[in-house]
Image: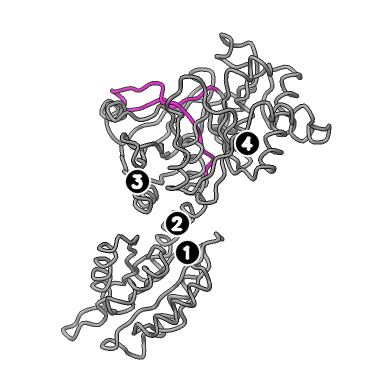
Amino acid sequence: MSNLKVGYMSLVKGSWINDKLEGQRQQALRDLENLDAEIVDCGMLIQSETEAEAVYRKFEDAQVDVILAHFITFSLGSIVPGMAVKLRKPVIFWSEPEPPMTGGRIAANSFCATNMNAHALWKMHLKYTLVYGHADAVVPELNRQLKVFECVKALKRVRIGSLGGRVPGFYTSDFNELAMREKFGAEVEGITLLELVKVAESIGKDELDEALAMVKGSCICKITDEELNKGAALLAAFRKLSAKYRLDAWTARCWPEFSDIYGIGVCHILGCMTQIGIPVACEGDAYGALAMMMVKILSGSDAFFCDLISFDQHGDTGLFWHCGAAPVSLCKDGCTPQLLKHSIIDGGDKKGIAVEFPLKPGPVTVVRIGDARDGNGYRLLSIGGEGVDTTQLLHGTPLTVKFNRPAEELVEKLVDSGFEHHYVLCHGDVRKELRLFAKMLDMELVEL
C-alpha cells in the first residue's frame, strides 16, 4: 500500500435524504478498501457546512493528501470548495450514474453536483479530477489517479546526486536547480568524482564481493577481472554515498574522466544502480533522473535512459538505444546480457564495462521533462508506442518502437519543438497518468 491518505467525504442534500443512503455510503467504504491508499472516513453523510467544518478538522489532523468527494446525491456548492481551499489538497470528484428513471422525481442528481463544484474549483485555480461510476467500477480508475498523486508527493522528497555535473557540450543536460526544486520539490546534491573514487578505493572485501555478485548477475562476462573488480568497487561506493547523502537517484558525468583516469567505463554500474531502485541518468541529465523516478512510480517498470538514433518513415518505427547502461531487468526473454568492452570509449573495444542486450517488447511510453523555451516553467513530452521484437542490431541496448502516428511527423515535431535528445522509456502505457501529472503541476504537455 502507498503512503497516501485519502479523505473520504460522503455528500448528500436534505431534499434527497432517504433510508438507503447510509447503506450506499457503507458499501462505498467497503469497496474503497481495495484502494492502494489509507482511507480517512468523514464518518457521516455530510449535508451542511457546519458538519463539514468538523470533517475538515479531522482531515487536517490526519494530514490527508487527497480529498475524495463522493456525491451520493446532489450537494451544496460551498462544502467541497471550502474544504479544498482550507486543506489545499487536490479533489477527486466521484459521481454515480442516475438511478433508473421511471417518470418520477429525480433520485440523486450526483453528476450535476460535480459539474457545479468543478466550476468553483476551476475559478479558484484548485486542482481536481473526476471519476464516474458505481463503487466497484471506479476503484481501478481511482487507483490509477492515486498513483499520480503518490508520484507528485514522492518527487517532493526526492534527492538527486549530481556526480561531477554534466558532460562536455551537452546543453541538453543543463537544468535550473531552484526552478526544479520549486516545481517538483526535488533537491540536488553535488558530489565530486574524486569522492566517489576515494570511497571506491576504501571498499572492504565483503562489500566488494557482494557488489561483484550484483555486477556479474546472470551476465556473460567478456571483460577482465580487473575491470569487474573496479566496477564492483564503484557500485559499492555509489551505494555508500547514496546512504550518506540520502539519495534517491543520481546523474553521472560518465565520460571522459572515468575511462581516462579510473580506467573503465561506468555504464553497467549505472544500470545496476537503476535496477536496485536508485535510478541513474547518464551524462549529467538531472531532468532525466527526475523522469526516471517518475516513470518508475507510475509504471512499476525500471526506466531506460536512451537516445532516439534512427527512424523508419515507412514502417513508422524508431530505434531507441544507449551504449550500455540499461538495467538487465529489461532484457528480452531468451537473451542473456553480456558484459563487454565499451563500443565507443577510446574508439571502441578497449575498456569495460558496458552491458549488451536487446530490450523486451511490449507497450511502452517515452517521456521527457524539460524547460519551457522562455525558461518560465516546464514541459512534459509523452510518446506512446509498442516495443517490437528487436535483435542485437548494434552494440549496446536497442529497442525498436512502433509509433502511434507517422514517424516522420513525430520526428519533425521533436526537432521543430527543440526537445532534448535524451529520453526516458518505460514499459507500460502511462499516457493517461502523464496527462494528470501535467495537469496537477501546470506543465505544458506535448503528446505524440
Badge 2 is on which residue?
149
State the quadrant of the C terminus. Answer: top left
Q: Earlier in the sequence, mark 1 or mark 4?
A: 1
The amino acid marked with disc number 2 is Phe
Marks 2 and 1 close (CB-CB < 8 Å): yes
Q: Position of residue 373 (x, y in %)?
A: 31, 34
The amino acid marked with disc number 3 is Met
Position above or below: 44 against 31 = below
Left or right relative to 27: residue 62: right
Q: Which residues are magenta?
A: 301-323
Q: Earlier in the sequence, mark 2 or mark 4?
A: 2
Q: Earlier in the sequence, mark 1 or mark 3?
A: 1
Of helix, strand and loop, which one carries label 1? loop
Badge 4 is on which residue?
273
Q: Main secondary structure of the magenta part?
A: strand
Q: Looking at this rendering, what residue extends furthest in the right direction?
A: 205
Badge 1 is on which residue?
65
Rendering colour mode: one colour
In the foreground, 333 or 10: 10
Q: Earlier in the sequence, mark 2 or mark 1?
A: 1
Q: Residue at x 64, y 14 (%)?
A: 260
The amino acid marked with disc number 1 is Asp
Position above or below: 94 against 215 = below
Q: Quadrant of residue 209?
A: top right
Q: CA distance from mark 1 to mark 3?
A: 20 Å
Q: Position of residue 30 (x, y in %)?
A: 48, 75
The answer to if 368 sits in the magenta stretch is no
Of helix, strand and loop, which one carries label 3? loop
